[in-house]
Image (tube, helix red, strand yellow):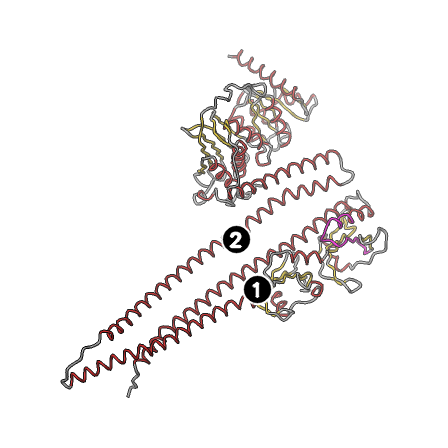
């Protein structure tokens, strides 16, 4: 016979059926949330240990580079061993990560040590460690080696000194391992974190805690086993102090390992605390449900007993009493309560789903931001290292004895040019930050837009990106109320962007015009173009498109961001247009135009003697070509440029300049062939002047046979150039008029 249960037990079962799934679901959600946070913490820990590995690689690379410079100086033979010893002592004094420098002969004979006076006896070297330096001529970073006294440890970096195409010496830097301890200590770390560097045999090289005691020790066997098996990872271990930790590791470029451990107790404690709170809440809910079942069960049982009594009265024919309304209301309230509970649960589930979706989007946004940050830092490092490498090399040249005046001048020019490049990068970064925080202000004044654009073009012509570029400039007079410096900054960024993404042989067109109430700057190139998907993002910070132009750099991705924000500060806007990849691009800046100010003279005198003559300069040497351009523009000529014969022929056909100054020794098509083609195609329309280093009578005769009107030998003075251009132009015009 089926056992029957009372209403109180039924209600209690109902409470359990309702609360147990909710508790289990809440526990599952808590675990999933904790697990997601655990994965995010592990990813962040791996990112941090990668940054530590990069810092270690940078420090070792810096040592190799500095030691290599000293080895190159020694290898030239300009310094003897005593001089190199003195140079090495100065290098050690200026390098906080070096403890000393040692040199020994390829035969193993010691030469000097900066820890002792020159000529003093020095300990011998182990050739087995430095054999790759002698045999393969490559730098070597040693593992941790005990001092001869046995009381300390050292790591050494060695590079070859090559004299006469043979390795004559090995130059070795002793690393200051305390400096590497400080390097790890200075990294941003959570409380209780331990960072360590291990050599190729997995012995502690440096550590941010207990460094002296740990140096030379092995980490735990399980960690060593995992590092041998995988190049990168994160796992839980018990460290040498018996503490439970979460350790992430990766390897550097020289084969060393870098590890970063954080205590696992604080991480796990949070989860168990939340689980305990959830358990207490669930137990409280169950206890309350039991009490509720007892109270309500008693009321319902009393009501049912009354109904039973009334039913018995009805069966016995007795009068039926009035059924209390309260009893029915209690049952209805229970039903309504269950419905409300169901609705509440659904709402909670919906809110949970929304929260998880929000968390997913936030995580995706954070990962994208982190990726953009990593890429930006990598590009910034590349953009900064290039000029710094040139400056470092030039500074080394400037300090080497026996340098010639031309070498000193070259080094100074390199330092000046690369310093200006660095300043431009830093100024752009600062301006982006100021614009983002609203801390930039404009010094407004009436500005003649075409004149400001001309100045920006002139300033950028000597820059690396615009050397040898042909610019077509079309301008109308229009005034704006603007900051002149910022307008030139807008134009400079647009010009550099156009040059960066277009081939050198194709022209860049610049137009300044007035359209209604707006002043318009338009820069058009015939380069790579912009994909339709990229057009809405070209002005976003750090966005860069791939460039297929040879030797092109993609930049930091902030130039166009500056253009847009500066234009907006002036009450204007900027837009980009492109018909697609390979079809070039047009950038248009629109600013509010103003009337011509009454205080501005409408007919200013020219700065230089105006000459209505266009001169084409054909020169493959960038410095010589740029110098000629500046010299001729200062004398009032309009100047076009070409770096080779093919480019010169294209400009002659497209523009038809009045005069062409042509170098003879051009790559590919030489100057004689350019002159022959010009004479065959244009006759006497163009004055051809040979400007060359070949100055014999035979060279002059050969130039005349090729079709040149005049032969000038380098270097030609400014007066000689002007006299040749004016006289030949006048003679050509006279002949043309006479023939007509």
Q: Where residue 625 appears, x then y in whole percent? A: 62, 29
Residue sitting farthest toward the top: 738
> Closer to the camera, 427 or 662?
427
Please give the range of residues in magenta: 89-108
Q: Identify the residue shown where x is 36% and y is 77%.
A: 291
Q: Is residue 454 above or below residue 242?
A: above
Helix, strand or loop for disc 1: strand
The residue identified by callout 1 is: 234
- Quarter of the image for the N terminus: give it: bottom left
Q: Which mark is residue 14?
A: none
Crowd class of label 2 (few under 14; some 14 to 19; many from 20; radius 10 Å) = few
Residue 699 seen from this side: no
The residue identified by callout 2 is: 370
* Magenta region includes residue 258: no
Dividing the picture into quadrants, the one containing residue 388 is top right
> Closer to the camera, 675 or 6?
6
Q: Identify the residue shown where x is 50% and y is 69%.
A: 273
């Amino acid at each position: 016979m089926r056992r029957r249960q009372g209403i109180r037990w039924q209600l209690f079962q109902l409470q359990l059926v309702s609360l147990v799934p909710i508790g289990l679901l809440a526990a599952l959600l808590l675990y999933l949330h904790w697990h997601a946070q655990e994965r995010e913490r592990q990813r962040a820990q791996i990112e941090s240990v990668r940054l530590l590995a990069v810092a270690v690689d940078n420090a070792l690379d810096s040592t190799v580079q500095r030691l290599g410079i000293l080895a190159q100086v020694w290898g030239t033979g300009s310094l003897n061993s005593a001089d190199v010893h003195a140079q090495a002592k100065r290098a050690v004094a200026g390098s906080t990560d070096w403890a000393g420098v040692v040199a020994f002969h390829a035969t193993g004979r010691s030469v000097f040590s900066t820890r002792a006076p020159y000529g003093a006896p020095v300990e011998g070297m182990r050739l087995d460690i430095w054999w790759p330096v002698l045999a393969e001529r490559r730098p070597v970073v040693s593992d941790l080696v005990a001092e001869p006294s046995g009381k300390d440890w050292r790591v050494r970096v060695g590079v070859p000194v090559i004299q006469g195409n043979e390795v004559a010496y090995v130059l070795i830097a002793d690393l200051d391992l305390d400096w590497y301890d400080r390097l790890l200590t200075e990294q941003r770390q959570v409380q209780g974190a331990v960072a360590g560097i291990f050599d190729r045999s997995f012995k502690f090289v440096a550590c941010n805690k207990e460094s002296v005691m740990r140096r030379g020790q092995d980490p735990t066997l399980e960690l060593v086993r995992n590092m041998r098996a995988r190049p990168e990872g994160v796992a839980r271990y018990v460290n040498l102090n018996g503490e439970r930790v979460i350790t992430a590791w990766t390897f550097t470029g020289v084969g060393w390992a870098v590890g970063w451990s954080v205590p696992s107790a604080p991480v796990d404690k949070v989860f168990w605390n939340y689980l305990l709170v959830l358990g207490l809440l669930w137990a409280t809910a169950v206890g309350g449900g039991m009490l509720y079942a007892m109270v309500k069960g008693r009321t319902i049982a009393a009501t049912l007993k009354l109904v039973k009594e009334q039913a018995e009265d009805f069966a016995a024919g007795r009068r039926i009493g009035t059924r209390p309304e309260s009893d029915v209301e209690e049952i209805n309230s229970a039903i309504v309560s269950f419905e409300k509970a169901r609705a509440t649960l659904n709402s909670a589930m919906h809110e949970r789903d929304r929260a998880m979706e929000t968390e997913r989007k936030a995580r995706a946004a954070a990962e994208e931001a982190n990726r953009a940050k990593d890429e930006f830092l990598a590009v910034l490092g590349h953009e900064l290292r290039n000029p710094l490498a040139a400056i470092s090399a030039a500074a080394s040249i400037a300090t080497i004895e026996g340098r010639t005046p031309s070498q000193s001048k070259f080094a100074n020019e390199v330092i000046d040019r690369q310093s200006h490049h660095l300043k431009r990068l830093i100024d752009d970064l600062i301006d982006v930050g100021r614009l983002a925080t609203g801390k930039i202000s404009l010094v407004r004044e009436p500005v003649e837009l075409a004149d400001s654009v001309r100045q920006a073009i002139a300033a950028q012509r000597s820059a690396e990106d615009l050397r040898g570029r042909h610019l077509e400039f079309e301008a109308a007079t229009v005034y704006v109320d603007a900051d002149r410096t910022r307008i030139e900054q807008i134009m400079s960024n647009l010009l550099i962007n156009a040059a960066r993404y277009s081939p050198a042989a194709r022209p860049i067109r610049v137009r300044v015009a007035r359209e209604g109430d707006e002043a318009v700057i338009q820069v058009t190139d015939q380069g790579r173009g912009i994909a339709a998907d990229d057009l809405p993002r070209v002005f976003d910070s750090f966005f860069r498109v791939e460039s297929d132009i040879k030797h092109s750099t993609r930049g930091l991705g902030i130039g166009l961001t500056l253009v847009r924000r500066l234009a907006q500060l002036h009450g204007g806007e900027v837009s980009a247009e492109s018909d697609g990849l390979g079809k070039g691009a047009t950038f248009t800046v629109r600013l509010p135009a103003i009337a011509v100010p009454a205080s501005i003279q409408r007919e200013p005198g020219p700065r230089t003697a105006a000459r209505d003559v266009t001169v084409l300069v054909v020169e493959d040497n960038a410095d010589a070509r740029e110098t000629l351009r500046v010299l001729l523009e200062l004398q009032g000529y309009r100047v076009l440029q070409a770096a080779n014969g093919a480019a010169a022929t294209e400009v002659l056909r497209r523009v038809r300049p009045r005069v062409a100054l042509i170098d003879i020794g051009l790559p590919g098509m030489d100057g004689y062939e350019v002159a022959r083609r010009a004479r065959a195609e244009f006759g006497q329309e163009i004055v051809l002047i040979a400007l060359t280093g070949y100055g014999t009578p035979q060279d002059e005769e050969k130039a005349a046979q090729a079709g040149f009107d005049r032969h000038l030998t380098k270097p030609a003075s400014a007066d000689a150039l002007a006299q040749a251009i004016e006289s030949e132009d006048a003679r050509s015009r006279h002949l043309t008029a006479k023939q007509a």
